[in-house]
Amino acid sequence: MAGSISNKSSLTKLQALNGLFAVYKKQGPTSADVLNSLKEVLLREAGVENPNPRKRKKQSMKMGHGGTLDSNASGVLVVGVGNGTKMLSTMLAGSKKYVAVGELGKATDTLDATGSVVLEKDFEHVTRLEVEEKLKTFTGDIMQIPPLYSALKKDGQRLSVLLKKGHKVEAKPARPVTVYNLTLQEFKPPLFTLALSSCAHVKELIRTKQGQFTLEEHALQEEQWTLEHILRALQPCPEADS
């Protein structure tokens, strides 16, 4: 009896959560996968038998994320729960920080390590100084053409998924972005962050900051996906009328 009361109390607390927090997304799963896994873990903790995170109406638990990370990327994934989902648009528009590792000499069709190599070139001539000079042209207010293999959607489906299914996809128009700072942290060819007179692809991408949430201070690891840890980490929002 005491156990059922405790579970009911946990579910009530879970369904009453309103705010934002951050979790760590590892390489492999999609952002939606992470969200569903998080929801399943929390519902199971609250005593819901065989929780299915996709049946949102029955479980009365509203949750969303504030900016997709590709499956091959890792790092900070901001989560909104309850009325916090209404605050997620601020995460999409807010500043972000990434650490990217590139591999020189090989270009892939997806621009990252998940694709097939489509071009190989020498890279021994590329120097650290040349890279640092080139980085300057990618800072400030620039026009950026989104890659075809991205999370952007057409008719409700991601461009990357459409491409993998063999559909023809047109490039999205360039859009303005602001790059506040871009630095070369390490130069150990063939691994570094940008190609010069060569070719390259992104080997690893880690989001280290999104809005006020940082990887080191705020992102909950999988073993911390509990109601107790979320209550500590939650940045609450005023309850709004639904």
Image: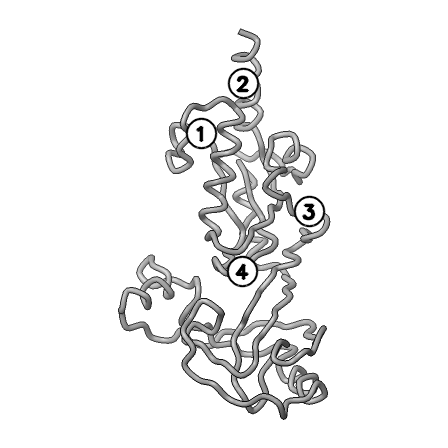
N-terminal-most mark, 1 or 4: 1
Callouts 4 and 3 close, C-beta under 8 Å: no
Q: Judging from the image, what secondary structure is the residue with disc 3 in?
A: loop
| Front disc: 4 or 3 | 4
Per the model, the C-alpha gap separating discs 1 and 4 is 30 Å
Q: Disc 2 or disc 1, which is closer to the eye?
A: 2
Nearest to the observer: residue 22 or residue 74: 74
Amino acid at pointer 3:
His
Q: Residue at x 65, y 55 (%)?
A: 211
Q: CA distance from mark 4 to mark 3?
A: 18 Å
Is the C-beta separation of discs 4 and 2 under 8 Å? no
| Crowding near the residue tagged with mark 2, few <14, some 14–19, many ≥20 C-alpha atoms within 10 Å | some
Where residue 231 sits, quadrant-wise, is top right
Q: Earlier in the sequence, mark 3 or mark 2?
A: 2
Q: Amino acid at mark 2?
A: Asn
Q: Amino acid at mark 1?
A: Ser
Residue 60: mark = 1
Whether residues under marks 3 and 1 lie with C-beta atoms below 8 angstroms apart, the answer is no
Measure the alpha-carbon separation of dots 2 and 1.
15 Å
Q: Which quadrant holds residue 123?
A: bottom right
Residue 7, numbered label = 2
How packed mark 1 is, by other alpha carbons closer than 10 Å (few <14, some 14-19, many 20 or more), is few
Q: Secondary structure at mark 4?
A: loop
Q: For mark 3, does the 10 Å Cα neighbourhood hold few (<14), some (14 to 19), or many (20 or more) residues?
A: some
Tell me which label, 2 or 1, sits earlier in the chain: 2
Between disc 4 and disc 2, the foreground one is 4
Which residue is label 3 attached to?
218
* Mark 3–mark 1 distance (CA, rounded to whole Å): 26 Å
Looking at the image, residue 208 lies above or below residue 100 = above
